[in-house]
Each structure stands twice: as C-alpha cells, then as structure tokens.
C-alpha cells in the first residue's frame, strides 16, 4: 500500500481527476488560481480540491494507473 496521498498521486498520473464511471473531469482550470501545471505542488492542489469537493480515489491493482477515481455524483451512487 502506498505511503503517499492517493489523491495527489492520481492527480499527478492523470494530470487531472477523471471519473472512471462517467465523463466528469476536475483539472487545474477548475482551481481558484487557474492553470498551474508548471508550478510546484499543482498535483497536491488538485488532489486537495478533489477531496474537498467529494471525489473518491482508491488504490486498485487492476486499474490502469493503480487508482480508481469517482466524481461526487458517481461516488454517491456507489455508496447506495
């Protein structure tokens, strides 16, 4: 199991939070500061924003990048 934050890792690997169940995307354009890919810490900022907005990130061995990502709407459906 990873010792790093899965939200930060998923943001870094995908350069965005992309829902595995629908077409929803959270990227740096959605952050209050706007695009900041070249800046240090953009992946942490994006991962933290995803957490705050209710995205779900979980490690999964069979996922392409090692994580499954769900937007808030799909996360609610999964919890039912």
Image (tube, grey):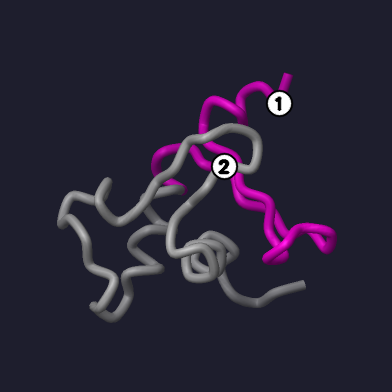
Disc assigned to residue 79: 1
Q: Is residue 61 magenta?
A: yes
- The quarter in which the N terminus is drawn is bottom right
Splitting the image into 4 quarters, where does residue 16 fall? bottom left
Q: Mark 2 Cα within 10 Å, few/some/many (few <14, many 20+)?
A: many
Splitting the image into 4 quarters, where does residue 56 fall? top right
Q: Going by the image, does 73 lie left or right of 66?
A: left
Q: Going by the image, does 53 lie left or right of 38?
A: right
Q: Mark 1 Cα within 10 Å, few/some/many (few <14, many 20+)?
A: few
* Residue depicted at 71% across the width and 26% down the height: 79
The x and y percentages for residue 14 are: 51, 63
Q: Is residue 56 magenta?
A: yes
- The quarter in which the C terminus is drawn is top right
Q: Earlier in the sequence, mark 1 or mark 2?
A: 2
Tag count: 2
Dot 1: what SS? helix
| Residue 9 position (above or below residue 51) | below
Q: Residue furthest right?
A: 62
* Residue depicted at 55% across the width and 63% down the height: 10
| Residue 61 position (above or below residue 69) | below
The x and y percentages for residue 59 are: 73, 59
* Residue depicted at 51% across the width and 32% down the height: 72
Q: Going by the image, does 65 lie left or right of 19?
A: right
Disc assigned to residue 19: 2
Task: Give the residues in magenta.
Answer: 51-80
Q: Residue furthest front?
A: 23
Q: Residue furthest left?
A: 33
Q: Residue furthest top?
A: 80
34 and 75: which is toward the camera: 34
The x and y percentages for residue 73 are: 54, 25
| Residue 29 position (above or below residue 3) | above
Distance Cα–Cα, label 1 vs label 2: 15 Å
């Amino acid at each position: 199991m990873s010792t790093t934050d899965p939200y930060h890792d998923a943001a870094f690997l995908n350069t965005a939070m992309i829902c595995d169940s629908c077409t929803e995307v959270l990227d740096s354009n959605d952050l209050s500061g706007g695009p900041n890919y070249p800046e240090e810490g953009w992946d942490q900022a994006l991962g933290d924003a995803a957490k705050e907005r209710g995205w779900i990130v979980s490690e999964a061995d069979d996922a392409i990048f090692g994580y499954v990502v769900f937007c808030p709407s799909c996360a609610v459906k999964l919890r039912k």
